[in-house]
Amino acid sequence: MTFLKNLLFRHSKGITDYFSDALRVYAFQGEEDARWAAIVAARVAGKRQRKFMSDRLSRMMSNVLKHHPDKSTRKLMADRLSSLQQEIAPRNGGVKDAREEKEKLSRLNEEYMGCLHRADPSIFRRKYPKFF
């Protein structure tokens, strides 16, 4: 039982890390595939995990607004994060919606979808090391 519990915890943590890294890439780079990766990661997360993700997104938005030196970039990043916050907010979508969002991510970026499936966030750090 402990093995299974540890496996599930690692997978859950991997999805949370995947979300955080996709979020960072989307905020700084504006990459639409990373946006969808974050949306789908939040969608497959449990209720408490999604709340944690939403809180992390809020903290990032607050940090950007307080500390980013360039005013126009600060506004752009805050707008990106705000739109993503609305997208991942808890809603009544079901399994069908999640499946459609996964399919969209697969069409946009199969590699991102494969990494999400494995709960492997390393793709974003390999692709965009300057953001980490």
Image (spheres, rainbow, N blue to C red):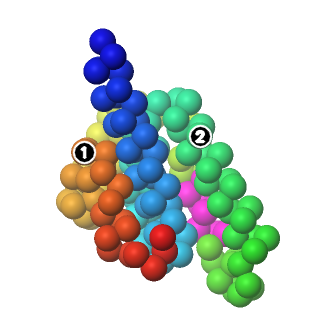
Q: Which residue is mark 2?
A: 52
Residue 79: % across, % down: 64, 69
Q: Residue 87: which disc?
A: none
Disc 1/disc 2 C-alpha distance (Å) = 20 Å
Q: Quadrant of the N terminus?
A: top left
Q: Is residue 111 left or right of residue 57?
A: left
Does 72 sit above or below residue 114? below
Tell me the magenta residue range. Answer: 78-85
Residue located 30% across and 51% down the image: 120
Q: Is residue 39 something one can see in this rendering? A: no
Q: Quadrant of residue 119?
A: top left
Q: Is residue 127 visible?
A: yes
Q: Quadrant of residue 48?
A: top right
The image quarter containing residue 22 is bottom left
Position of residue 25 relative to residue 11, above or below, is below
Q: Tell me if mark 1 has few (under 14), some (14-19) or many (20+) residues whose alpha carbon lies within 10 angstroms of its own.
A: few
Query: The residue tagged with tag 2: helix, strand or loop?
Result: helix
Residue marked by disc 1: 118
Residue 18 sits inside the magenta stretch: no
Q: Between disc 1 and disc 2, whose residue precedes? A: 2
Name the amino acid, label 2: Phe
Residue name at image x 65 percent, y 46 percent: 55
Q: Position of residue 131 (x, y in %)?
A: 49, 74
